[in-house]
Amino acid sequence: MSRYTGPRLKIMRALGTQLPGLSSKSIEDRPYLPGQHGQKQKRKSDFGVKLMEKQKLRYNYGLTETQIRRLFVEAKRAKMPTGDKFLELLERRLDNAVFRADFAPTTVAARQLVRHKHILLNGKRVNIPSIRIKPGDTLALNGAAAKIPMVIESLKEPSLTRPEWLHFDDTTRTAQINRVPMADEVPFPIDVQQVVEYYAQRI
């Protein structure tokens, strides 16, 4: 299954949750399902609930189904609780760290910055969004990226409060990773146990 490139607000309305990594727009004006009968809420099955929680993660972090399954398998092999490790691995992606540092308004935009080699990881240009950050790593913009209007606007008006696991230096416009992200620092409501149960039946 390929990466989603369609209407983002429609997806958030369907999932009933603001996903900051997917879009900076709000669903407050229309907090119901999209479509002609969207305001007639339907009761979801147990499978529907599990699928919805899984889709929240997939769309917020902009992953394909293959990518998210691969991360889940890795999380399942860890010694810590599978759900907590799964969320940690998602938060530790480079494109997500670029987004959480406010270099970009969404994870989608952050991935584009990385792909175009606008991000410096420990002083070196990188172009792989899935690189896993670790404590001590430093993120910075290259000279050209600092002049991009989207980047300037994102730094001026951040869409989210920066997480505690990341320290941002306003003078140098660099972000340093202080520690590994924790499961409860995901910036939207998620019942990760439902996701664990969803994949437990399929992997």
Image (spheres, grey):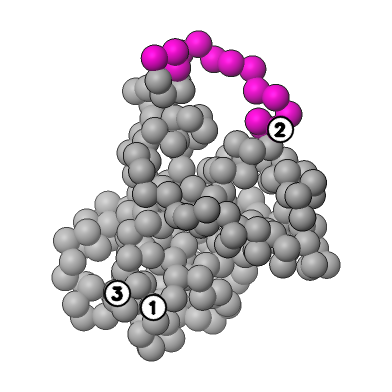
C-alpha distance separating marks 2 and 3: 39 Å
C-alpha distance separating marks 1 and 2: 37 Å
Amino acid carrying label 3: it is His
Q: Nearer the viewer, residue 152 or 131?
A: 131
Residue 34 falls within the magenta-colored stretch: no
Disc 1 on helix, strand or loop? loop
> Would you say residue 26 is visible in this rendering?
yes
Q: Are marks 3 and 1 in contact (CB under 8 Å)?
A: yes
**Left or right: 185, with 144 as reference point:** right
Residue 48 falls within the magenta-colored stretch: yes
Q: Which residue is mark 3?
A: 116
Q: Which residue is mark 1?
A: 127
Q: Are marks 2 and 3 in contact (CB under 8 Å)?
A: no
Residue 24 placement: quadrant:
top left
Crowd tier of the residue under label 3, counting other residues whose Cα lies within 10 Å: few below 14, some 14–19, many 20 or above: few
- Magenta extent: 36-49
> Would you say residue 173 is visible in this rendering?
no
Amino acid carrying label 2: it is Phe
The tag earlier along the polypeptide, 3 or 1, is 3
User: Residue 106 location in percent, x, y?
Assistant: 37, 54
Amino acid carrying label 1: it is Asn
* Quadrant of the image containing the C terminus: bottom right
Crowd tier of the residue under label 2, counting other residues whose Cα lies within 10 Å: few below 14, some 14–19, many 20 or above: few
- Which label belongs to residue 47? 2
Q: Is residue 9 above or below residue 87?
A: above
